[in-house]
Image (cartoon, rainbow, N blue to C red):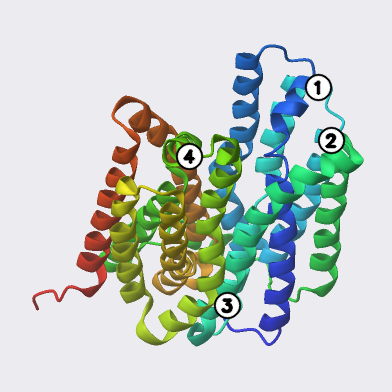
Amino acid sequence: MQHEHWKRNLAVCMIGSFTTIIGMTVVLPFLPLYVAQLGVQGHAEIVQWSGIAFGATFLSAALVAPLWGRLADQYGRKLMLIRASLGMTVATALIGMAQDAWQLVVLRLLTGLLGGYASGSIALVAAQTPKERSGWALGMLSSTIMAGNLAGPLLGGGLPALIGIRNTFFASAALIGLAFIGTSVLIREDHHPRKLADRKEVSAAKLSSAQKRAVIAMLATGVLLMFANMSIEPIITVYVAELSNDQGSVTMMAGIVMSATALGAILSAAFLGRVADRAGHPRLIVSCLALASALLLPQAFVHETWQLVVLRFLMGLSLGGLLPCVASVIRHSVPERAVGQFLGYSTSAQYAGQVLGPVLGGLVGGRIGMGAVFIGSALLMGLGAVFNYQTFLKRRPA
């Protein structure tokens, strides 16, 4: 259903997603310091608790994303955005009051359980935007989400030195609180709660074989996208150290390498979304996956850090259009009454990629070699391109 306020809703969702993503990622640079401040001693223990606390949010968010999507279909997507922004405001402020590591982990779990603003925004924008503009609109939203992932760690690296770690959490909570106010006041949605019979119909909705293939392909694509982005996280600093002659700049260069992919995706998302609206979302998905596969392979054989930066930036350009296309294909492939539910499944699949990428990347990099991580990721992306081609573009016999 199209909506006369879709442009204003898009703007609010972009700002709200940007601020809430910052709230989730600002903790990255100083999390080990906060864990130590909470009384954990010993390098190994601090690293272990930091990993658990960081992963807790994404684990709980993956588990509840389909639930929030289903409730959004039934009771309204604006209501879910209000719930997410208010819940994250409270949870983030409470993290700043934590007294031990267990409380930190529980509150990070709570953040994931109560959150979901960005995924809720995708559902709202996908449902309200005219179909011929959905790729562009979702591309704009995707750009702000990725910008939040980039800005969060940057702010987290500077704010604690200026205002302290606990006050950084309080500042983040205040920022998310602004998203709560803006969402409550500015977003317009014409939604009427469904009757009980209608809710049962939604839960029992059966997709055709073509719709099922499309949804499965999009879930797999979401996993592959996040896997390709995150698989190098555990090895990148060591890999840059092997390439660099200046060991004093390894950390800085590793940060540049990781940021290059996000920057490329931010720059290309809206443009590729517009291209997809004209050329077709499946065609762009196949092209982007194939190009990303081709760009991953030479990353295993670079000799200079700048070569890796350029290749990661180009890969980001190629991947920027994938998330908007995934959301658009799902929106066009399932009944209107179940869009939020299936976009919730897509969000869970993407979180799975965020978890699997670093785990398998670290395992393969440590046991086989760091080049094998890039080669393996390239093969997976190539298989994803073939799978999507077979699903959407290959002519089937009559």
SS of the residue under disc 2:
helix
**The disc labelled 1 sits on which kind of residue?**
Gln
Q: Nearer the viewer, mark 3 or mark 2?
A: 2
- Mark 4: give few (<14), some (14-19) or many (20+) Cα within 10 Å: few
SS of the residue under disc 4:
loop
Residue labelled with disc 2:
165
Report whether 192 appears left or right of 383. right
**The disc labelled 2 sits on which kind of residue?**
Ile
Question: Image point 84% across, 48% down: which residue?
Answer: 173
Percent position of residue 318, x then y: 41, 67
Mark closest to the chain's N terminus, 3 or 4: 3
Residue labelled with disc 4:
245
Evaluate whether residue 83 shows in this view: yes
Mark closest to the chain's N terminus, 4 or 2: 2
Residue labelled with disc 1:
37
Q: Nearer the viewer, mark 1 or mark 4?
A: 4
Q: Evaluate if marks 1 and 3 touch, with contact meaning CB atoms under 8 Å apart.
A: no
| Residue in the foreground of this view, choosing between 98 and 189 | 98
